[in-house]
Amino acid sequence: MQVVLIAFALLFCGVKAGNTQKQCSTDCEGNHWSYSGDSSPKCWSICNPKCQGTRQSPINLQIGKAKFMGIFQAPEVSGPLTVKMKASNNGHTVVLAKTSGQSIHISGVGLDGSFIFDQLHFHWGSEASTGSEHTLNGNHWPMEMHVVTHNDKYESIGEAKTAPDGLAVFAYFFQIVKQDNPGLSDLLAVVDSVPNKGDSSDEMSFQLVKFLPPFGGDFFRYKGSLTTPGCFESVTWTLFTGLTVPISENQLNKFRQLMTAGDGGKDAHPMFNNFRPTQALNAREILFGVIGA
Ligand SMILES: [Zn+2]
């Protein structure tokens, strides 16, 4: 009977992708997901029904369809200058997560409330023409950084991530330049230290501001979701499209050399194209603001 059930499930979980019928794994144990094969984004909703929601992220940004929301001061960042963080390779990306110490609060730019910094991570491509999750008029940037924060009215990110006003994610976009950007050297040393899935660094002291580019220029705002399973629709997105972060191909290659599985793992391959395709906007409004006068 079990065999019959599995065969039945396989028959009905085929997902149309262009003209090819791709099969999705129905094994939800361990909630394995990835960016390709039988656990790719088209398959996520089988084990994570929220990934089929109507307020999903990322989206394609179109300036012509955005509604102007005003001119703002730069976001207010308060708390210690230096934070303790740990880097890790989770097989999907490299994450720098705050480990201990006083909270860093981010507020302003039209956000409702004050948000506490939790972690930052990246999405990038195999080549410069692709990589970011959000697109602008259909075009990708080569890399996108997500700074993940939770609303301070919730005890923790765990509690906040399922609440409609729980999270604020700030997205920064990178642009390829010829020369190395010396401002990225601390970050790249950290990336180098976690080559394989499961690797993590020692706890290190970081000046968070070193990772946050100067705020300025245009930004987009909309209500969306986490871009990975469980796809909870709890994120107020702020996308700083006005100022991009310069990075050389050589520096971006440090990210592309990370591996998706443990040392010697049989499924290991270089980590890139770790972005979810853009999702339907549906009935949502995209807002557009400017920082600075
Ligand atoms: Zn992300």
Image (cartoon, helix red, strand yellow):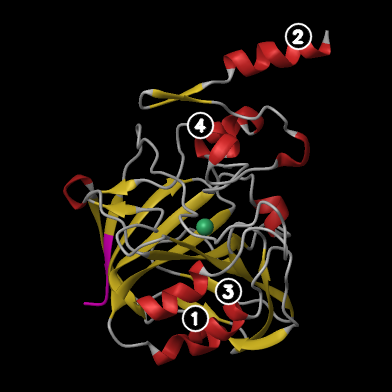
* Neighbours of disc 3 within 10 Å: few (<14), some (14-19), many (20+): many
Between discs 1 and 3, the one toward the N terminus: 3
Query: Which residue, given by chain and number where applicable, does mark 2 sit on?
Result: 4
Is label 2 within 8 A of ligand 1 (CB to nearest ligand atom)? no
Query: Where does the image place residue 232, in percent across and percent down from the top left?
Result: 58, 42
Q: Is there any visible trace of residue 118 in the rendered image?
A: no
Please determine whether, in this image, residue 176 is positioned above or below residue 13: below
Query: Which residue, given by chain and number where applicable, does mark 3 sit on?
Result: 105
Q: CA distance from mark 2 to mark 3?
A: 54 Å
Query: Which residue, given by chain and number where applicable, does mark 4 sit on?
Result: 53
Q: Residue at x 56, y 26 (%)?
A: 23
CB within 8 Å, label 2 to label 1: no
Of labels 3 and 4, the one closer to you: 4
Q: In the image, what residue type sits under mark 1?
A: Phe
Between discs 2 and 4, the one toward the N terminus: 2
Q: Residue at x 59, y 80 (%)?
A: 192
Please determine whether, in this image, residue 106 is positioned above or below residue 206: above
Q: Which residues are magenta?
A: 289-293
Q: In the image, what residue type sits under mark 3?
A: His
Is label 4 within 8 A of ligand 1 (CB to nearest ligand atom)? no
Q: Residue furthest right?
A: 1
Q: Residue at x 35, y 80 (%)?
A: 248
Residue 44: mark in rendering = none
Query: Which residue, given by chain and number where applicable, does mark 1 sit on?
Result: 211
Give the quarter of the image for residue 154. bottom right
Which of these two is toward me, 263 or 161? 263
Between discs 4 and 1, the one toward the N terminus: 4
